[in-house]
Image: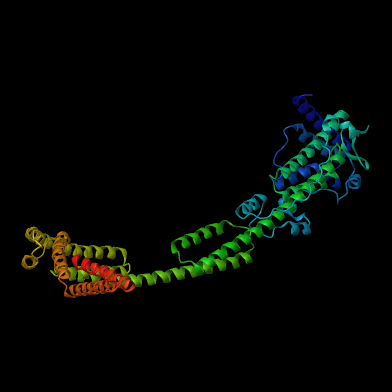
Amino acid sequence: MTDTDRETTASTDTEAVAVATEETVPEETPEAAAPEVPADVAVAEVAVADGTVAEVPAEVPAEVATSEVATSEVATSEVPAEETVTEVPAEAATPEVTPETATSEVPAEETVTEVPEVAEVTDVAEVTAVTAVTPAADPVPAEPPKAPAPVPVASTDPSRWGRVDAEGKVYVTTADGEREVGSWQAGEPQEGLAHYARRFDDIRTEVELLEARIVSGAGDPKQSLTSAKHVKESLVVAAVVGDIAALEARIEYVLAHARQAIEAAKQAREAARAGSIARKQELAEEAETIAGESTQWKSAGDRLRTILDEWKTIRGVDRKTDEQLWRRFSKARDTFNRRRGSHFADLDRQRSTAKARKQELVDEAELLSESDDWGVTAGRYKTLMTEWKAAGRAPKDSDDALWQRFRAAQDKFFARRSSAFNDRDAEFGDNAKAKEDLLAEAEKINTGDLDNARSHLHKIQERWESIGKVPRERVRELEGRMRTIEEKVRQAADQQWRRTDPEAQARAAQFRERVEEFESKAAKARAAGDNRRAEQAEAQAAQWREWLAAAEQAVATR
């Protein structure tokens, strides 16, 4: 049957039902005036109110809506009011659900359990964000429930789960037996079963969507739990034909999965909250350490700003704890700012003192720049430089300007001294030439005539002193050559003195007399035939002869 045929049949069925209603019910009773709301219609309204089921399955035919209206009218006209009350208990009927009633229907104890303790963290995505900022131990999830067998599609073979009797009443087969779900008077019984089977498939599709959202984590598990509960409650009186037991098992699976997801989200929030508190505790302690110890003002200030930026990104801490930690962090920042302000205030005072002291040094340096006392002034400039370094840093603009003035005065003095030294060095060059001539003359002195050599050297020394100073780079050379000539004359005088030393001559004469004495004794003893005494005398004479030779050699080598 095509979609067009179905629409035509539905229109015909509607008209037939309308005629049957007029003939069956002669007058409108109070009970019949208020038609019952089918259970599946209530489910559809719940889905729209909650916002959980926004999609309508594409495979649901357009005539389903028309058939539902027809069924509602048939049920109203053919079922007496007292039978309606008996078959559909008031407590089992599902009223129209609005966002307010949907909220009020959630049991109080479940609402308390599911409300997160941390208001800032409202879903799993935000919990994940907080955990990314502050890693914490992941909660160990419970073992997921086992998924039941898939719910079979009822519209493929609706006769497996229901029937239409001869009077047009539609029954669905449940675990407790058959339950009447409606009446079909507009067409063939199989079309009626197919109609109620499609309504069953709509509910099955809704459950599958809820399951997909919970499993994928794309939806709010709390909202999915509420929607699944509504579907479960409406299934008791739903006017559908299908595998009710399989669908109930699937709904229970969805409910278990939703509860597990809610518990996992709660544990994740708790873990994120503990991690956030621990991280803010660490940041507060680090800030307190910086405030009490750090003197690296630039890097410490940058670190406190970084801590503040990170602090703002950490969420999920309860208000009381957050305020306590924030007071610690804020106090640490204030302490650091006071210490830093005090440090730079002291530094400003020190720089002001340094500026005044350097101003004094600059004034003195500018006065000394006109001095002609080269040696003393150069020494004083050296002392001024030492005092400049010891004065410390002045404010940068003032320090640079004062240094330029100090350096200019110093350069001016040393430029004048260099000019004066250049003029003096030109004069000293002539003196060096004169001293070179004197050295050439002095190097020709003959030390063989010692008296004449001494006299000549003395005259040269007098002329040397009268010439004056020479360039500094020539002083060591010229003075060294003069010292060499003077040493030569002195050594010649020493040698002459040693050769004419009276004491040395007297010792040599004494040794000579002793040699002659022992030689005479030896000759006399040998003449007397006393060989022993002769040999002793000769030995003594030989000993004294050696000493005589040594004395004469010493005199000769002086």
User: Can the viewer see residue 162 in this picture?
Assistant: yes
User: Can the viewer see residue 186 in this picture?
Assistant: no
Vertical side of 506 occupied by 136: above or below: above
Q: In which quarter of the image is the N terminus?
A: top right
Question: Within the image, what quadrant is residue 493 found in?
Answer: bottom left
Q: In this view, does 208 lie to the left or right of 358?
A: right
Using the image as rendered, state which of residue 276 and residue 505 is in the foreground: 505
Using the image as rendered, state which of residue 301 and residue 538 is in the foreground: 538
The residue located at (63%, 66%) in the rendering is 321
Vertical side of 173 occupied by 126: above or below: below
Using the image as rendered, state which of residue 551 and residue 496 is in the foreground: 551
Vertical side of 440 occupied by 328: above or below: below
Rendered location of residue 17, percent (x, y): 84, 33
The residue located at (82%, 30%) in the rendering is 13
Rendered location of residue 400, percent (x, y): 27, 62
Q: In which quarter of the image is the C terminus?
A: bottom left
Q: In this view, does 388 lie to the left or right of 409?
A: right
Rendered location of residue 217, percent (x, y): 70, 45
Question: Within the image, what quadrant is residue 339 found in?
Answer: bottom left
